[in-house]
Amino acid sequence: FGSSSEPRACNCIGVLPFRAAETMAPKKAAPSAEKVAKAVKGAVSRKVKKVRNNVHFFKPKTLMKRREPKYPRRSVESRQRMDKYRIIQCPVTTESAMKKIEEINTLVFLVDIKATKLNIKAAVKELYDVK
């Protein structure tokens, strides 16, 4: 190998040239690193095996995050099928209905079979401005 005083190139990973290693000053370790070093130097503790008193295994409850999709699964929002015009179909104009209108001050309508009382009430309020 020759007697030159120049540092030789090394193919080893993580090895510094001789001169650079001499100039590096030792650094003080961080407090957390000191704790770890103290724990490593201490006695070796064995892991205690968990005693199971039940034959059934229950999956541990972990963090359940809400879904945050990257794109909407439907391109268009669904519209409400039961609008006010579908709920109230038409007024009833039979003799008995006319009698109710005159005597009891009550309107009579044909309504959708799937409509609830609350739906009918809201539709009448919107269409006829009545309470």
Image (cartoon, rainbow, N blue to C red):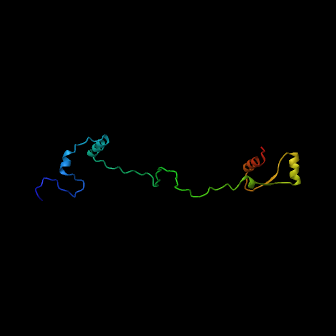
Image-based side of 96 in relation to 113, left or right: right
Q: Where is residue 76? Give x, y as percent.
A: 61, 57
Image-based side of 102 in relation to 43, left or right: right
Residue, far bottom: 1
Of 104 and 52, nearer the camera is 104
Residue, far left: 3
Of 4 and 111, nearer the camera is 4
> Which part of the image, by quadrant, shows the N terminus?
bottom left
> Which part of the image, by quadrant, shows the C terminus?
top right
Q: Where is residue 46? Give x, y as percent.
A: 31, 49
Q: Where is residue 72? Give x, y as percent.
A: 56, 56
Residue in the image at 75% along x and 48% along y: 126
Q: Where is residue 61? Give x, y as percent.
A: 48, 50
Residue in the image at 18% along x and 50% along y: 18
Residue in the image at 88% along x and 52% along y: 96
- Looking at the image, is 4 positioned above or below residue 23? below
Residue 77: quarter of image: bottom right
